[in-house]
Amino acid sequence: MAEKKVWHRFELKRRSKGLKKRARKAEGATIRHARRFVVNRWENIREVRAHIILWLTGIAMLIALVGMQMLWFQRAYLATEPISGGTYAEAVIGPINTLNPLYATTPAEIAAGQLLFSSLYSYDSSGHLKGDIAVSMKTDDAKTYTVVLRDDARWHNGKQVTAEDVIFTVELMKNTAARSVMNASWRGVEAKQIDKHTVEFTLPATYVAFPQALTFAILPKHLLCDVQPSSLRESSFSKSPIGSGPFSLRLLQVVNAASGRKVVHLAATEQHYEGRPRLDRLQLHVYDSGEAIGQALRTGEVNAASDVPIDIASSVNSQRYDQVAKNINSGVYVIFNAANPVLGDDSVRKALQIGTNTQEIRNQFEVKPQRLDLPFVSDQVIGADALRAPKYDLDAADKLLTESGWIMQNGSRIKNDVKLQLRLVTRKSPEYQKVLAVLIKQWKILGIDVQQQVVDVNDTAQNFAQDILQRRNYDVLLDELVIGGDPDVFAYWHSLGILNFANYSNQTSDDALASARTQLNPELRAVKYIAFANRWLADAPAIGLYQSNTIYFHSKASRSLEPGEKLVSNNEHYANVRYWTAEQGSVYKTP
């Protein structure tokens, strides 16, 4: 054994000497070749360097020419277009305290509900109702509606969406223990299952505009049937829901608890019944103010923002973002409280109507809002385009007030030793404060003393809805009225309407509003609404200042809300969300 180890050491030593000898020979050969073909010929290279430079220059030009030719031909078959994939980050106003659509009240909560959940009907990009999960609807008397559901809708966990889910959701909305924000709207409505994919709704009275109510989010019965309605709001489902919409929940991220800064992370639904969205991810970045949204746009924290305030919109970089301004079916009105003895006088209201220059108010804004003369949007009613409010006439307004006994003395109107004074109440916002300034100026010319009260709705010490609206605690109210997808404004202007902020009462107007709700024939329905609008203009319970609008921003590279789309409300801009994109890339042109 020892002899074998010695032999191995001898063999390795002998081979090592051989390798060293061959390496020295290779080194010597390399040096000789270098001297012969490089060093000894260096002078020759220097002599022909001009030719070499010329040859290299020619090669470089040839390569550049080929590259330019390739780029030139690429333009013929490649184009820069929006591409699928990527993440779209949109800023919305919060807070967001729940992801359950039964309790959604803020823009952020409503947006999350629309992306996570499906509904029977939704609004399309033209502002009209279209079937979402519903494929058809039938009614003979506008009191009983039969709705048929599609059979390929699935919850994000793979279970099928059925008529049982629709009925379960309706019963939850009606249940006072569930505390749904839609409870009042569904009282008295009965929902019955006809078969697995058919639901019948029976109303307590004829109501033509009922289809507008079928845009509610549908909840999964199989996940919530064992949850007590009184516990639903605080349940785990309300924090981490399973829906059937175009996007599913990945994560609700709390960025800053103190400011309410959160991010809702959503992923595209792979097997959505209308097809997978082009985006891979969609994020809702929740902020507590318009100023915070403006800052997020400036820093690039998001690539889009919805319902940006007018004063913030003017500071957004137009080189980086596209602005899309849309009229929505809401209006800003000056509403006169007829319970005030002064405003109970038709002549005073008429004087304010013709003594208010609404065009000057609209001119205050960089993005000019559309004129709104009527208690509804004119294109909602056939033939309503011809109706107009009386023209601005300061002399006629002065005459009306004087004839009513309000005499101008030292710049003020006096009657029976009482000064004409009105308390005008509004919400705190840069938009309304601009309007307020113009109104005070114009009405001062008429001799009216305006006492303004601006309520900060974000101040927990002030409750605008309870302290101001419910109590009708104002002489004049400057506020927005949401009209929606149908011209039914019964709640605002009928004497029995729960939102009749003007305390307006007129038998002709009441009859027209009540009758219009029962008319299935669009032409006859339009006649009723025009009759109501004419009476409304003559009585002047309010002044229409302008149609509300919403301003949307998105980055130049993304595609989302388009200029040609029409919105019913600022929360209805997801009609084409399946086709939104976040990025651009080179794609082959189709022949």
Image: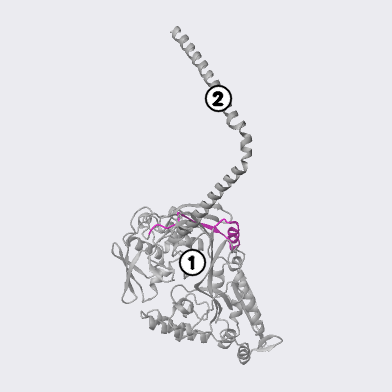
- At a point 61% along the width and 69% down the height, the residue shown is 430
Q: Residues within 10 Å of mark 2 (few under 14, many from 20)?
A: few
Q: Are marks 1 and 2 in contact (CB under 8 Å)?
A: no
Q: Residue 49 falls in which quadrant of the image?
A: top right
Q: Nearer the viewer, mark 1 or mark 2?
A: 2
What x and y, as percent, mark residue 105? 49, 64
Q: Circle 2 sits on which residue? A: 29
- Reply above or below: 276 against 425: above
Q: Amino acid at mark 1?
A: Glu
Relative depth, front residue between 285 and 141: 285
Measured Cα–Cα span from mark 1 to mark 2:
75 Å
Residue 393 visible: yes
- Reply above or below: 105 against 141: above
Tell me how many marks there are: 2
Magenta span has 330? no
Classify mark 1: helix, strand or loop. Answer: loop
Quarter of the picture containing the N terminus is top left
What are the residue bounds of the magenta stretch? Answer: 275-302
Classify mark 2: helix, strand or loop. Answer: helix
Relative depth, front residue between 521 and 14: 14
Residue 94 visible: no
Magenta span has 280? yes
Residue 562's disc number: 1
Q: Residue furthest right?
A: 410
Relative depth, front residue between 458 and 179: 458
What x and y, as percent, mark residue 91? 54, 59
